[in-house]
Image (tube, helix red, strand yellow):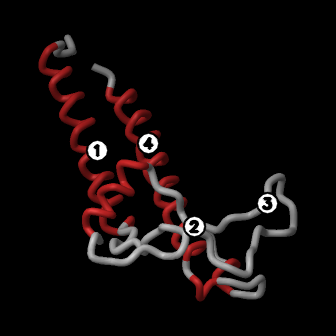
Amino acid sequence: MDFGNYKILAFKRQAQIMMVHDCNIIVDKLTRSENKGKSNPVWEEMPTLSSGQNEDDRIFDDIPYAIGLSECTADLLFAISSSETPSANGGFRCPIEILGKEILPLLSITTQFSLLEYFEVELYKYPSSG
């Protein structure tokens, strides 16, 4: 069994998880009303949302962004917050924070252990002749 394959796959998975983490931070920045305005220093710290092709202008807005949720997620959140009155457009405030700082490390550790377990099982099934 070649553990070089494990290393490559593990690094790829870790990079994917970190990219999700970066996107989580960006979404958190975009949805906070205190982050509005072009001169806000939060937009100087990475990760952040910017325009493509290394343009100087970053993408800003004077009002925070909102997130459109999947129907399944929206139904779950509605069940959790069913006592709240909907806004004029029928939406609800999300009663749950985006906890990427807690969830993503758990996902990362679980993924790494799962991958290691897979490769250990393969090693026992096909021991090397060395």
- Which one is in front, 98 or 130? 98
**Residue 123 in the image: x percent, y percent?**
18, 22
Q: Residues within 10 Å of mark 1 (few under 14, many from 20)?
A: some
Task: For marks 3 and 1, give the CA distance.
Answer: 33 Å
Which residue occupies 33% across, 77% down?
A: 84
Q: Are marks 3 and 4 in contact (CB under 8 Å)?
A: no
| Label 2 secondary element | helix
Closer to us: mark 4 or mark 2? Answer: 2
Q: Pointer 1: what residue?
A: 112
Closer to us: mark 3 or mark 1? Answer: 3
Task: For marks 3 and 2, give the CA distance.
Answer: 13 Å
Q: Are marks 3 and 1 in contact (CB under 8 Å)?
A: no
Q: Pointer 2: what residue?
A: 26
Q: Is residue 54 left or right of residue 114?
A: right
The tag on residue 11 is 4
Amino acid type, mark 4: Phe
**Residue 129 in the image: x percent, y percent?**
20, 11
Task: For marks 4 and 1, give the CA distance.
Answer: 10 Å
**Residue 70 in the image: x percent, y percent?**
44, 50
- Which one is in front, 51 or 70? 70
Q: Are marks 4 and 1 in contact (CB under 8 Å)?
A: no
| Label 3 secondary element | loop
Vertical placement of residue 120 versus 106, above or below? above
Whichever of labels 4 and 2 marks the residue nearer the N terminus, that label is: 4
